[in-house]
Image: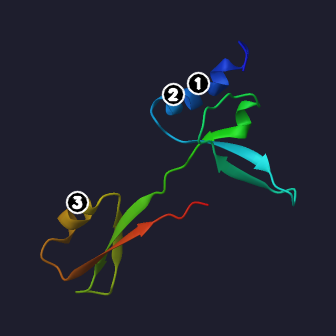
Amino acid sequence: MNASNAKDYLPLVQALSEGKVIQYKYQKSDKSYAWMDLESSVDFCMPAEFYRIKPEPREIFVVIDNDNDGSHLAFHSEDDAIKDVGSRDYAIRRYREVIE
């Protein structure tokens, strides 16, 4: 990192200060790329595009209406899903994104 590219690293440094995990992009033996968690200190010796903030899995809550045709609605929180159901016959399913 130097004065001309320091701004590219700012989001990474901010995330690191907040305790988030920084990942490094490396080339595997089969020439494909993968992300690896950096568990010790981060020195940012490679270009900024070789680093990222580890993505957090997203979660949605789906309300399935059993009274009617099985239609469904998605919400970002379980509380919002519960507020939507009222007195209907329903099921709530939680889905979490898988990140590799």
Quarter of the figure that contains the N terminus: top right
Residue 10, label in figure = 1
Identify which residue, 99 or 88, lies in the foreground. Answer: 99
Residue at left 39%, top 63%? Answer: 60
Front position among marks 1 and 3: 1
Q: Is residue 67 left or right of residue 38?
A: left
Q: How is the image coloured?
A: rainbow
- Amino acid type at circle 1 is Leu
The x and y percentages for residue 95 are 42, 69
Mark 2 Cα-neighbour bin, 10 Å: few <14, some 14–19, many ≥20: few
Q: In which quarter of the image is residue 23?
A: top right
Front position among marks 2 and 3: 2
Mark 1 Cα-neighbour bin, 10 Å: few <14, some 14–19, many ≥20: few
The residues tagged by marks 2 and 3 sit, at their Cα atoms, a distance apart of 30 Å
Quarter of the figure that contains the C terminus: bottom right
Image vertical order of residue 15 relative to residue 5, above or below: below
Is mark 1 in CB contact (under 8 Å) with mark 2? yes
Which residue is most to the front?
Answer: 40
The x and y percentages for residue 77 are 30, 58
Which residue is labeled 3 in the image?
Answer: 79
The x and y percentages for residue 91 are 27, 79
The answer to which of marks 2 and 3 sits earlier in the sequence is: 2
- Amino acid type at circle 3 is Asp
Element at badge 3? helix
The residues tagged by marks 1 and 2 sit, at their Cα atoms, a distance apart of 6 Å
Residue 14, label in figure = 2
